[in-house]
Image (cartoon, helix red, strand yellow):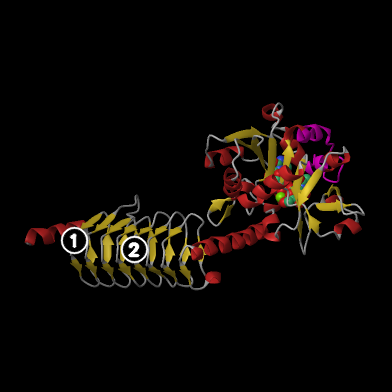
C-alpha cells in the first residue's frame, strides 16, 4: 500500500458565517468542526496531516495538538487550489496518495474515506472523488457528466449556467489523489471564474482533461456531503451529529426516552442501562456510570462524573463534581465543584454555594449524609460521613466545626 497523507483546508475567512472566530473552530455538539475531520483521517491511518490555516491561524493551532499535524500557513485566501499549493514545499517529492478534505465538513466519517481508498486501489485511478445527489444543491459545485455519464469536471455554483444550476449531483469536496498528479494539476489552475479564486475543482477537471483516470464514489448520503458555510448549516450539522451520538449510545445500552428533546455532547460517556429522561442537556466532558436515571430537565456540565445508580431529577444541575454510587439529587438542586459520597440524599432545592465572589470553592460531602430540603452549603466545606443537615439550614465550615466541638 502506498504511503498516505491528508491535507485539510481550514484557512478560509468565512464571510457567510459572519464571525471573528475561525470557521473550523465553530462547534458541533461541543467539539470544533476540525476535530471531526482529524478523527476521520486518523481512523484510516495517514502518516501526516497538513492543516492549511490562515484566518485566525493562532486560534486554530492552539486548540489542537498531535505529532501527526503539520500546520501550513496560507497568508492570503486565494482559493482551495491555492491552499493545496501552500503544501508544495512539504509534498513536492511525495509519491504516495493524498487525501484532500475541507475543515468545514465535520460529518465526514472514516468509513467514507476507507471506501474512497479501496475503490481507488481497485480501479487504479489517478484520483477519486465523491458525489452526492441533493434535493437542494445550492452553493455546491456541480458534477458535469458527458452524454455517456462520464464525469468531465466540476463547476462551482457561481459559475454555472442555468442548465447546470439544475444539476443535483454535487461535489462534497473530499478527494484522494495520486500526489504527483495532484500537484501537476494544481500548478496549472488559474483564477478564471466569477470569484477570481484558484479552485481545487478546476484541478480535478484538468486531471480528467489530461487523460488521467478519475473515478467517483457516487450516491454519498446527503448528510455526509454537507459543508458548513453559515450558522443555519452549523445548526443542521449539529442536529445530524446529535442523532449519530445518540444512536451510538443507544447501541451501547443507554435508554434515551425522547431523542428529539435531549442534547448530549460528543465528549460525554454514558454507561449501560442508564436512562436519560426528556429535556436533559449534557454539556462537556461528562461521565455517567451504569444504571443511573437522569432527568427530566437535568443539566449536566463539564467535569461531572456520576458513578453507578445515581438519580438526578428534575432541574438538577451538576458541574465539575463527582457523585458516588447511589447518590440522589431529585429536585431543583445545584451541585457545583463538589465530591459527594455514596448514598447521599440531597433534598429539594439544596445548593452548594461554591462561588464567594472571587473564587470557586469545593464542597466535600461524606458517605450516607442526608441533606434536607433548601439547605445552602457554603464552600469551602467538608461534611463528615453520616451527617444530617436539617431543612433550610445554611451550613458553613465554621458552623460544622462548632457542632464537632459540642460532641
Ligand atoms: C467547496 C468546493 C465545492 C464543494 C463545497 C462542498 C471549491 C472551489 N469548491 O466550496 O465544489 O461543493 O466545497 O462543501 O473547492 N479554504 C482555504 N483557503 C482558501 C479558500 C478556502 O483553506 O483560500 C478552505 C475553507 O476554510 C474551507 C474549505 O477550504 O474549509 C472550502 O472552502 P469554502 O469557501 O467553504 O468552499 P465552498 O464554497 O464551500
Ligand atoms: Mg464550504
Q: Earlier in the sequence, mark 1 or mark 2?
A: 2
Residue at left offset 87%, top offset 39%: 211
Separation (CA) of disc 1 from disc 2: 19 Å
In depth, the one of 300 and 336 nearer the eye is 300
At 43% from the left and 65% from the top, the residue drawn is: 299
Task: Farthest residue to the front: give it.
Answer: 122
Residue 116 visible in this rendered orientation of the protein? yes
Residue under the point 43% across and 55% down? 302
Q: Looking at the image, how many numbered discs can be counted on the residues? A: 2
Query: Which quadrant does the N terminus fall into?
Result: top right
> Residue 275 appears at what percent x and percent y?
43, 70
Q: Based on the displayed image, in which of its 4 quarters is residue 247 positioned?
A: bottom right
User: Which one is nearer the viewer's eye here, 276 or 97?
Assistant: 97
Q: Estimate how packed mark 2 is, as few (under 14), some (14 to 19) or many (20 or more) residues with alpha carbons within 10 Å.
A: many
Q: Report which quarter residue 372 is drawn in.
A: bottom left
262 sits to left or right of 378: right
Q: Identify the residue under disc 2.
A: 308
Amino acid at each position: 500500500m502506498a504511503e498516505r497523507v491528508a491535507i485539510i483546508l481550514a484557512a478560509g475567512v468565512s464571510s457567510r458565517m459572519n464571525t471573528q472566530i475561525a470557521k473550523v473552530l465553530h462547534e458541533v455538539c461541543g467539539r470544533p468542526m476540525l476535530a471531526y475531520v482529524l478523527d476521520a483521517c486518523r481512523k484510516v491511518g495517514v502518516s501526516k496531516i497538513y492543516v492549511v490555516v490562515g484566518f485566525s491561524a493562532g486560534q486554530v493551532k492552539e486548540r489542537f495538538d498531535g505529532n501527526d499535524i503539520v500546520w501550513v500557513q496560507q497568508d492570503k485566501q486565494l482559493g482551495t487550489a491555492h491552499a493545496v499549493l501552500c503544501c508544495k514545499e512539504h509534498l513536492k517529492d511525495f509519491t504516495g496518495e493524498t487525501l484532500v478534505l475541507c475543515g468545514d465538513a465535520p460529518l465526514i466519517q472514516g468509513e467514507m474515506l476507507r471506501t474512497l481508498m479501496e475503490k481507488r486501489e481497485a480501479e487504479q485511478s489517478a484520483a477519486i472523488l465523491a458525489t452526492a445527489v441533493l434535493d437542494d444543491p445550492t452553493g455546491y459545485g456541480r458534477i458535469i457528466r458527458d452524454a455517456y455519464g462520464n464525469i468531465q469536471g466540476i463547476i462551482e455554483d457561481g459559475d454555472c449556467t442555468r442548465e447546470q444550476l439544475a444539476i443535483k449531483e454535487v461535489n462534497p469536496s473530499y478527494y484522494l489523489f495520486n500526489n504527483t498528479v495532484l500537484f501537476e494539476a494544481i500548478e496549472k489552475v488559474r483564477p478564471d471564474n466569477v470569484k477570481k479564486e484558484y479552485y481545487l475543482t478546476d484541478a480535478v477537471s484538468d486531471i480528467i482533461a489530461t487523460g488521467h483516470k478519475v473515478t467517483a464514489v457516487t450516491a454519498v448520503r446527503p448528510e455526509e456531503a454537507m459543508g458548513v458555510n453559515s450558522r443555519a448549516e452549523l445548526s443542521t450539522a449539529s442536529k445530524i451529529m446529535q442523532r449519530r451520538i445518540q444512536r451510538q449510545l443507544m447501541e451501547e445500552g443507554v435508554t434515551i426516552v425522547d431523542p428529539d428533546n435531549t442534547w448530549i455532547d460528543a465528549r460525554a460517556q454514558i454507561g449501560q442501562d442508564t436512562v436519560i429522561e426528556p429535556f436533559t442537556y449534557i454539556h462537556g466532558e461528562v461521565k455517567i456510570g451504569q444504571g443511573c436515571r437522569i432527568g427530566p430537565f437535568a443539566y449536566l456540565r463539564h467535569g461531572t462524573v456520576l458513578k453507578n445508580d445515581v438519580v438526578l431529577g428534575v432541574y438538577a444541575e451538576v458541574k465539575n463534581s463527582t457523585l458516588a454510587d447511589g447518590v440522589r439529587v431529585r429536585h431543583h438542586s445545584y451541585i457545583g465543584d463538589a465530591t459527594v459520597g455514596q448514598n447521599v440524599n440531597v433534598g429539594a432545592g439544596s445548593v452548594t454555594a461554591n462561588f464567594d465572589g472571587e473564587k470557586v470553592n469545593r464542597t466535600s460531602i461524606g458517605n450516607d449524609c442526608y441533606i434536607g430540603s433548601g439547605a445552602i452549603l457554603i464552600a469551602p466545606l467538608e461534611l463528615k460521613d453520616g451527617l444530617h443537615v436539617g431543612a433550610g439550614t445554611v451550613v458553613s465550615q465554621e458552623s460544622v466545626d462548632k457542632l464537632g466541638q459540642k460532641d
